[in-house]
Amino acid sequence: MADAGVAGFGSLLRQLRLDASLTIEALAEASGVSVRGIGDLERGRRATPQRGTVAALADGLGLGEAERERFLAAARSGRNPRPHSASLRVFPRGIDDFTGRGAELARLTALAEQAVAGLPVAAAVSGPPGAGKTTLALHAAHELAGRFPGGQLLLDLRGMDDDPPGPAELMLRVLKALGVADRDLAKAGPQGHPGLYRQVLAERRCLLVLDNARDEAQVRPLLPSAGAGMVVVTSRRMLTGLESVHRLPLGELSPADATALLTVLVGRERTDADPVALAEVAHSCAHLPLALRVAGNWLATRTGWSLRRLADRLALEERRLDQLSAGDLHLSAAFDLSYRQLTPGAARLFRLLSLVDGPDVSAAGAAQLTGQHLFDAEDTLEELVETGLLGTDRDRYRLHDLLRLYARSRLRAEEPEGESEKARSALRRWMLETAVVAGRWYEPDHGAPPATWQGTADLSTAEHARHWLQAEGDNWLAALRAAANAGDHTTVVEVAEALHWFSDQWIFWGHWPEVFGTAARCAQALGDPLLEATQLNYHAWALLVCERRHRDSVDRSAQALAAAQRAGDLPQQGWAHVYSAWALGLLGDHAAAAHHNQESARLFEAAGDLHGTLQAMSSTAQNLHLAGRNEESVTEHIRTLAFLDQAGDDIEPHVAEVTRANLQMNIGRAYASLRNWSEAAGHLHTAVRLWRDGGNNGMESRALVFLGDALLAAGRDDEARNAFTRCLALGTAADPQRITEARERLAGLG
């Protein structure tokens, strides 16, 4: 609402104009003041009528001496309002339907309490275009207004303009808005305004919202150094260079808050009628507040539209950005503002990042897209992060889903098609080449990268290799699919072969059946029976262990055995028997399983294959457990452990690590079947430690549930509860079946 002094001056101006029988246009011509200026003054829209303007209006009105003095006095009152808590209490539309951001509001409230206690506070709210930074700041200002009786002011810093206002201009606007007299401003002069600004903020408990900041240089002089005030800065940039500020990065809303905002905008009756479509609309909007508001406004003004109709239209990615427009709200226009401020190199990388197949990428991967040196690529990525167009999670970089669509549209518009395909191919080729080198850390007869390897990923240790393979899993899997579709069968088989033993480290990733199934088809296409047998065996393992498709695994093993016999390869024949025995044992056909184990042991011994012999022994011991012959199983497992110890360095370290942990776990299970809880718990504790030390969370989750069950049966409920809780803590890296079992056990324990 307008200040009382300003409103009084405006009313007086209008009355004097009407008394003089002048239109606004006539007064404008007589005084030299613009029509718009006079209209703004009469409506109270201008808070500080200048002396020259007032004198010109008085002359244009032809005022006598008494009326002129009255007129000038009213203007002085309008220029020097007393600060009061209603300085900025009219908020833009949209505040009433504010949704979510509970944690951020709580933090701003806590910071306001610090300011009230006498500590000046500055908070920087940053985030990508459309994240709702201004909405949050204004809503917080509304909620916190009562704590700042010295005034609450909003300044639009116009950070996206080509020529935004500088600190001096903004400082002067704050001083005038807070009622500093023109004579005091003139006395201080431009050089004294910073000191006067600091003095005023130190003396008054004010809340300033500096919206849409350009950069640190624009904002830094406006931050308070003393007093009980608070400044909230919003910017698309992270404003990394600002010192002593509390940072509140904003991202998308939670799914629940996103659907809640749509419900407020559209109406509960319509959203309750189709909650599935509601969730789909929120998902297509990537839970971004501006996109949600556009979609909600669209539905609110088209009452004949169902949520399903809009959900289906938004489902088409190539049209989604065009659909997210309502009136003068255009999502892509918000993205345009940030994109136009990028340097050419950053703009090109932004476009090319839309080619990344997975949800995120490393700096080394981004460098493949542009052909830059790694350090140069990192600098360019950080520019995108700073401008709010790219998110980070540790050493990964991620485009928001809608920004990815926008980047893809700019790629089509600006990047030559051949260049785009060249960049995509370079990235995918690098992904597969690096996957081979990383996977071979876990392969017998390979290990560390060769001295000649000049890769940009850090594969200096097996743990680093594991981290890279898991972090880039979606990307190298997409590259593998592309290679298979392009008929590059040799590359597909090479990658799968390199990842064979690594797959034990990441069993429950969810894609090993696809990887090895694809490789088996490619091997068949190459017409090499040995390659075919090898990949069919890997696929049999994946079906058995990852998907528990025991019967399908038996069928695949039979195909592998036939191919291995055609190739005359004894080790692959042995592996086919191992996987057949494993699956048949789980299916309850223990006699057939025993036969296959005997055959595998014979073939591996004939081939001199120590790794195969070790697995055949382990499989024999496990089948005895499945058959209920637990004392024999314990004896055979211990014999296998002794064989492993005796083999020493002849067994690849990671193979030995996995086998040892598996043997300890299975000994514990056999003892549990014998109701020897003490021995069971001891071996299962050892297995948990070995899996954990090896970083194999999937198998650790299995061992924890087996341990918890043994402890529960022994009446050691607190220890059992701890084991099940630790299993749940492993999250998505755990075996999903064991997570379900752990939850059930904990529910039973209360």
Image (cartoon, rainbow, N blue to C red):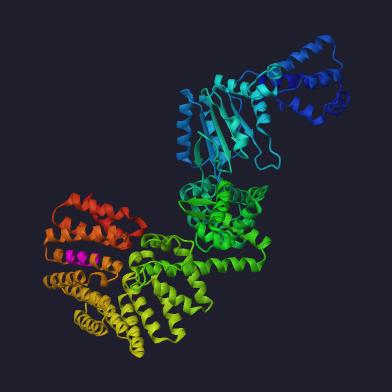
Residue 612 position, x and y percent, is 27, 77
Q: Is residue 664 magenta?
A: yes
- The residue located at (49%, 26%) in the rendering is 115
Is 565 in front, or is 267? 565
Position of residue 138 in the picture relative to residue 167 (left or right)? left
Residue 335 position, x and y percent, is 63, 50
Q: Residue furthest front?
A: 451
Q: Is residue 320 visible?
A: no
Q: Is residue 107 above or below residue 316?
A: above
Is 18 in front, or is 141? 141
Provide the residue span drawn in magenta.
661-669
Q: Report the quarter where the N terminus lies.
A: top right
Position of residue 254 in the picture relative to residue 192 (left or right)? left
Residue 118 position, x and y percent, is 48, 23
Question: What secondary structure is the stretch in magenta mostly built from?
Answer: helix
- The residue located at (51%, 54%) in the rendering is 397
Q: Is residue 732 above or below residue 103?
A: below
Is 259 in front, or is 401? 401
- The residue located at (23%, 75%) in the rendering is 614
Q: Is residue 394 magenta?
A: no
Q: Quadrant of residue 580?
A: bottom left
Q: Quadrant of residue 737?
A: bottom left
Position of residue 228 in the picture relative to residue 661 (left or right)? right
Position of residue 488 in the picture relative to residue 666 (left or right)? right
Q: Is residue 111 visible?
A: yes
Residue 508 position, x and y percent, is 35, 65
Q: How many marks?
A: 0
Is 16 in front, or is 79? 79
